[in-house]
Each structure stands twice: as C-alpha cells, then as structure tokens.
Image (cartoon, helix red, strand yellow):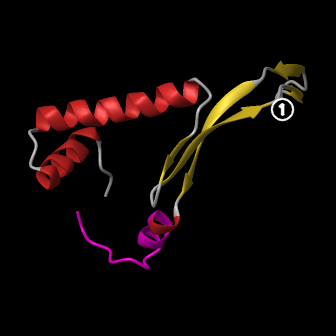
Amino acid sequence: MNINRKKLIRLVAKKTKLTQKDTALTIDATLDTIMDALNAGNAIKLINFGKFISIEHKGRIVKNPRTGEEMELENRIHPKFTPGKKFKDVVSGIGAREEI
C-alpha cells in the first residue's frame, strides 16, 4: 500500500493527538527545512533515522542514443538519503513490522 500526503497527515495526527491542520503544517515545515538546508549545502543527520546530504555530479559529455549527437551535461546537485541502523532494521524485518 502507498501512503500519500493526506494519509501520512492522518496517521501522524493520530499518533501525536494533534489536529490534522497542525500536523500538516508541521510536516510541511519539516520537509521545507530539510530542503532549505540541503539547498544551502548543509547535511541533516537524524540519529536512528538517517542522513540527508547533497551530492554534486560533475558535468560531462554524453551521446544521445537516438541520434549519436554529443551533448554536454552541466554540473548538477542531487539529494541523497542514507538510512540509519534502526531505520534499516525496521524496514528489513528485524524490528516488529506493523500494518498501517
């Protein structure tokens, strides 16, 4: 099952006993803060959850597979998430798995 934004808000609101409106504001603020930090070149490390970092990919010359034409890719920055130990343990089944 996939969990969309609305369902995530409902689930977190239920666990925290906050209103769905307050929960939505909190989730949006958290995600915006993570994106702003990565955009500024900072890393976010959340113990037992994981680490968010920005990775720079250098520009390079590539060939278009259809035309064979050479194109230059510019430098790009991509976000990267590395899960923490507890996160990996829970997802891999070492921790108790519960249905949502």
Residue at 62 percent across and 28 percent down: it is 41
Residue at 19 percent across and 38 percent down: it is 23
Q: Where is mark 1, residue-wise?
A: 65
From the image, give the main secondary structure of the stretch colored magenta: loop
**Residue type for callout 1:** Pro
Query: Residue 100: where, in percent of width, then height?
Result: 22, 62
Viewer-side residue, 63 vs 33? 33
In the rendered view, would you say 56 is above or below 2?
above
Q: Is residue 78 left or right of residue 74?
A: left
Query: Residue 78: where, in percent of width, then height?
Result: 64, 33
Residue at 25 percent across and 46 percent down: it is 8
Viewer-side residue, 10 vs 36? 36
SS of the residue under disc 1: loop
78 is within the stretch colored magenta: no
Q: Is residue 36 left or right of residue 3?
A: right
Q: Image quadrant of residue 60?
A: top right
93 is within the stretch colored magenta: yes
Q: Is residue 57 left or right of residue 61?
A: left
Query: Residue 86: where, in percent of width, then height?
Result: 45, 67
Residue range of the region highlighted in magenta in the rendering? 87-100
In the rendered view, would you say 97 is above or below 43?
below
Residue at 83 percent across and 32 percent down: it is 65
In the rendered view, would you say 98 is above or below 59?
below
Viewer-side residue, 43 vs 4? 43
Q: How many marks?
A: 1
Q: Is residue 52 left or right of residue 96?
A: right
Query: Residue 1: where, in percent of width, then height?
Result: 31, 58
Viewer-side residue, 41 vs 35? 41
Within 10 Å of disc 1 (Cα), the crowding (few <14, some 14-19, many 20+) is few
